């Protein structure tokens, strides 16, 4: 179940709002958190990338997922009580709740720049800021939002109001704006810096601070008529700030920076956060109790003003490669140098073991006590390691160390019988739980990416150059099977001795119904690298790949459906403990969990790809100001190509014409149907044939 980290930029994704059949995958670890807000010592929320909303009712002992109605990164959250709150995010996304987040509803604003900050004075009066000078206001709790004139085109990154008339906005290029009439008029203030100002906070109508790039801290004692620098003692970017009174405050930033002052910022000193991950925002209830959140889902808290910060979620940023389970609660994950463990189905993951001698690539447990981890590294030659535990991970010991191969995969059929595979075509076998490992002759020197055994005798191994090997005698003899491809095969899965699937680079999906005597390509139409495949029965399976690809089938792969997490993580392994319960792991410590309730398949479903229609990834991508989109049709057809924003709203119809058989292309100049340039961001281009079947891909406009 392994994959190498071969980075590609483009991938085939379908936004979930366009799906008739929708799976729900939730973050368990790894999402970058961007803001945190606690109402009291118990109740709070944290938000971040990939529409992540985390909620706690016990002060952060447990953080659970809440489900928004839209996909997209979430940047800021604000609550006025335990029930009423708002979240803003990318592409103009505004969410609101009146029941503490049990239900989130979209609020509509006519423009769609990324919104960066939200602030409310009461249940009616609020403001939000965003890219390109966006500044919006509501007087009815967000039922209606209207634009205020900021007078600038810079990104506005934070907003703070001291009452319903007096407020400030901070942004890029040292921007500070000030209003005394609720935002009807915004006036610039001189900050004295061109560094981006990421956050602004006022303790009273006169005393405030703004922070930003290169360790910048600015202070005012006259409502911003004069802003003066304070010495931060760091050059790290600073992201979040809060004061509990005019003297006592905290700042968080890059590399786990936490700064604290008790004299209004005349002196700032460092507090030890325990992490090197970027901390993006902070929330204090009083001078003692506070939380900070940041990259890879890290959450730290303190109850003594920051003298001691403790992890609530540690935040793991390394690549994760393999999953194994004892049952639906007891699971294990390997990362580059770490082993993670959970005993509650992933609600809490903790680091079980850190091993610095090599990258750990795969893991296999046969029961709650016995497990194996394999890995390797290359330094003037390959090195491979096998680690073993007999006490449920309390102790890990090296069972095998070789200088002829790096190990990438491990598979056991019981606590005694197992195989490991690696570079140079090497496969090792044990029949005594790893006390002795014996090399098996594979007849190849290609990398072995994965091994799968159906029983003690029948197994397969896959690897580079389209390699598929098969054995019927436990690996004493490995026979080459014809894959029909030279692409790297990353993973293989069999549900019995006949039915199996293999996946690999360039969108490769292979299927066999006769034990591998014949392998057939299942044509899906993506060129993204596919890294892992898992089937729970002969019909139901999942595939994951680079840049957030998740595919799902309920008919043995005759058709595959997209699930879009709305993120660009590299997904390396998918694993299910039963037909309903699964996990995915990937880059930057990402762990996703799905309790799956089934998918209904209609004759017409937006996520089914038409094999008679091919839509290429646009080029260049990212692009500015224009990009070329190529497609081909197998029959003379009525074809429509349109551009949608991330919320699924059509902004441009490129054509709606009859096209003949063959290859075609068109240029999109980045304008909408009114010939107005659209803002930077992610857009979807959707190809329809005969008004029915659709293929959708994403593109990125960067100005």
Image (cartoon, grey):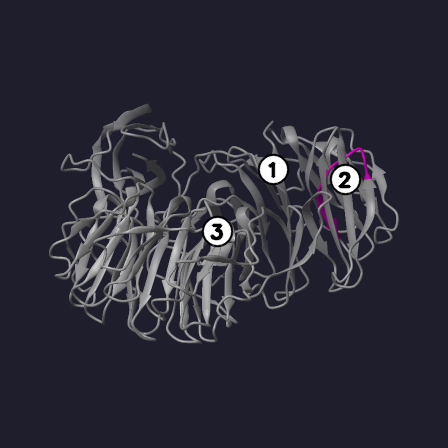
Up-down: is 229 above or below 487? below
Q: Residue at x 23, y 43 (%)?
A: 132
- Give the percent coordinates (x, y) of residue 557: 51, 45
Q: Which mark is residue 278?
A: 3
Q: CA distance from mark 2 to mark 3?
A: 33 Å
Residue annotated with mark 2: 384
Q: Earlier in the sequence, mark 3 or mark 1?
A: 1
- Which label sits in the foreground, 2 or 3? 3
Q: Residue at x 27, y 28 (%)?
A: 626
Q: Which residues are magenta?
A: 402-412
Q: Which mark is residue 303?
A: none
**Closer-to-camera residue (222/648):** 222
Residue annotated with mark 1: 4
Q: Earlier in the sequence, mark 1 or mark 2?
A: 1
Residue 149 seen: yes
**Closer-to-camera residue (682/473):** 682
Q: CA distance from mark 1 to mark 2?
A: 16 Å
């Amino acid at each position: 179940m392994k994959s190498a980290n071969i980075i590609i930029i483009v991938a085939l994704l379908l936004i979930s709002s366009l799906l008739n059949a929708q799976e729900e995958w939730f973050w368990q670890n790894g999402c970058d958190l961007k803001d945190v807000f606690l109402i009291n010592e118990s109740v709070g929320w944290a938000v971040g990338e990939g529409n992540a909303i985390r909620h706690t009712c016990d002060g952060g002992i447990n953080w659970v997922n809440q489900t928004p109605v839209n996909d997209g990164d979430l940047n800021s959250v604000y609550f006025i009580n335990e029930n009423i709150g708002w979240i803003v995010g990318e592409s103009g996304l505004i969410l609101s709740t009146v029941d503490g987040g049990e239900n989130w509803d979209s609020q509509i604003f006519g423009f769609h720049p990324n919104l960066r900050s939200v602030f409310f004075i009461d249940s009616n009066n609020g403001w939000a800021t965003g890219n390109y000078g966006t500044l919006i206001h509501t007087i009815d709790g967000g039922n209606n939002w209207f634009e205020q004139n900021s007078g600038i085109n810079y990104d506005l990154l934070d907003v703070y109001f001291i009452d319903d008339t007096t407020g400030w906005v901070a942004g890029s290029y040292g921007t500070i704006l000030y209003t005394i009439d609720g935002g009807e008029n915004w006036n610039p203030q001189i900050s004295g810096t061109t560094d981006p100002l990421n956050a602004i906070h006022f303790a009273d109508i006169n005393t405030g601070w703004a922070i930003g790039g290169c360790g910048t801290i600015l202070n005012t004692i006259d409502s911003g008529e004069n802003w003066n620098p304070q010495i931060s003692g760091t050059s790290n970017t600073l992201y979040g700030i809060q004061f509990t009174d005019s003297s006592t405050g905290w700042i968080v930033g890059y590399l786990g920076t936490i700064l604290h002052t008790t004299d209004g910022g005349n002196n700032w000193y460092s507090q030890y956060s325990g992490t090197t991950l970027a901390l993006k925002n902070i929330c204090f209830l009083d001078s003692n109790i506070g939380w900070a959140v940041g990259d890879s889902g890290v959450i730290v808290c303190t109850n003594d003003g920051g003298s001691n910060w403790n992890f609530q979620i540690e935040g793991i940023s390394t690549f994760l490669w393999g999953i194994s389970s004892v049952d639906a609660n007891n699971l294990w994950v390997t990362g580059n140098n770490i082993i993670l463990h959970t005993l509650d189905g992933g609600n809490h993951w903790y680091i079980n073991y850190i091993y610095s001698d090599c990258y750990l690539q795969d893991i296999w447990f046969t029961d709650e006590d016995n497990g194996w981890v394999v890995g390797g590294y290359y330094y003037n030659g390959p090195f491979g390691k096998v680690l073993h535990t007999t006490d449920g991970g309390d102790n890990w010991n090296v069972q095998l160390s070789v200088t002829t191969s790096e190990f990438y995969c491990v598979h056991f059929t019981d606590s005694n019988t197992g195989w490991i595979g690696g570079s140079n075509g090497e496969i090792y076998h044990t029949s005594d739980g790893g006390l002795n490992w014996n090399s098996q002759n594979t007849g190849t020197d290609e990398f072995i990416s994965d091994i799968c055994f159906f029983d003690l005798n029948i197994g397969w191994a896959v690897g580079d150059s389209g390699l598929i090997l098969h054995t019927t005698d436990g690996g004493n003899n490995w026979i080459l099977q014809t894959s029909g491809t030279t692409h790297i095969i990353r993973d293989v899965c069999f549900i019995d001795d006949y039915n199996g699937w293999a996946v690999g680079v360039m969108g490769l999906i292979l299927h066999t119904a006769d034990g591998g005597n014949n392998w057939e390509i299942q044509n899906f139409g993506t060129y993204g690298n596919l890294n892992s495949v898992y089937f729970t029965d002969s019909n139901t399976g999942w595939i994951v790949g680079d840049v957030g690809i998740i595919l799902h089938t309920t008919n043995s792969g005759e058709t595959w459906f997209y699930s879009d997490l709305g993120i660009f993580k590299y997904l390396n392994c998918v694993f299910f403990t039963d037909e309903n319960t699964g996990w995915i792991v990937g880059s930057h410590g990402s762990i996703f969990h799905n309790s799956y309730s089934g998918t209904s398949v209609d004759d017409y479903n937006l996520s089914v790809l038409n094999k008679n229609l091919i839509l290429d990834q646009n080029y260049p991508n990212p692009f500015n100001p224009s990009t070329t989109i190529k497609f081909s049709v197998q029959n003379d057809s009525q074809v429509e190509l349109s551009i949608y924003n991330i919320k699924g709203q059509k902004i441009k119809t490129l054509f709606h014409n009859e096209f003949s058989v063959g290859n075609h292309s068109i240029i999109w100049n980045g304008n909408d149907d009114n010939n107005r340039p659209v803002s930077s961001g992610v857009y979807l281009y959707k190809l329809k044939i005969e008004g029915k079947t659709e293929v959708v891909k994403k593109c990125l406009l960067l100005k």
